Amino acid sequence: MTNILAFIESGIIESYVLGTATIAQVAEVELMAKEHIEVRNEIEDIGKALEHFALAHAVKPNPNLKPFLMATLDYTTRIENGEELSFPPELQPGATIADYAPWLNRADMVLPQNFKDAHVKIIGYTPAAVTAIVWIKHMAPQEVHHDEFEKFLIVEGSCDLTIGQEVHHLVAGNYLAIPLHINHSLIITSSIPCKVILQRIAA
């Protein structure tokens, strides 16, 4: 029994469960587990403890991540299939919805039927700027940008954009730029999804 306790306390089982054990250590643990219930129980206990730790310290992913990832894949596929590169104008004070009509009026720039929370269609990309048409149904959670300026032009619907402690009530035609290093979040206030031209410019 002393040898089994020493084996359990050696740390080799933790390495085995974490997947960092050597081939020789894996073989040793599996042999010991086959012969001793104490080792099998220890493997199970360590696995459960790690699972509980992971769940307790899990970080909820930003829900905006998936729509932008899917948009990047969609844009890449479109370019590979022959779509010509386009360069929408940079959003500036005085920008109008009409400035983006060539992209907004495209037949493929529409919401899919399975739209849930957010949908993104990239319409222009350079290393310095990404421009997209974005539909948001309910909200965009709080985030901070440290290396890119984010700019909005509301196309349809309305929203409250909170930057720091200040709330901006935005409707179609409104433009707003978000400064670096400041928390901001978005709540949709219209009965329809808020449709925006979104541009992210490298700082």
Image (cartoon, rainbow, N blue to C red):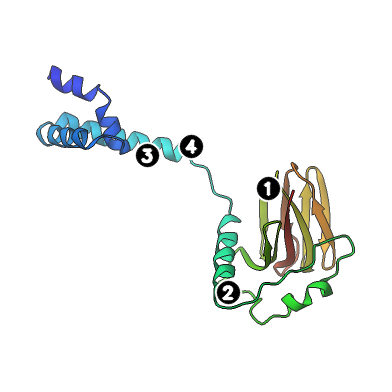
* Left-right relation of 199 to 114: right
Mark sitting earlier along the chain (3/2): 3
Residue identified by numbered label 2: 78
3D distance between C-alphas at marks 3 and 2: 41 Å
Residue identified by numbered label 4: 57
Identity of the amino acid at label 2?
Answer: Arg
**Rendered residue at 14%/19% (across/down):** 3
3D distance between C-alphas at marks 4 and 3: 10 Å
Mark sitting earlier along the chain (1/2): 2
Vertical placement of 171 versus 12: above or below? below
**Rendered residue at 46%/37% (across/down):** 56
Q: Secondary structure at mark 1?
A: strand
Mark sitting earlier along the chain (1/3): 3
Identity of the amino acid at label 3?
Answer: Glu
Q: Secondary structure at mark 2?
A: helix
Q: Dot 1 surroundings within 10 Å: few (below 14), some, or many (20 or more)?
A: some
**Rendered residue at 52%/42% (across/down):** 59
3D distance between C-alphas at marks 1 and 2: 31 Å
Identity of the amino acid at label 1?
Answer: Gln
Vertical placement of 119 versus 186: above or below? below
* Left-right relation of 199 to 74: right
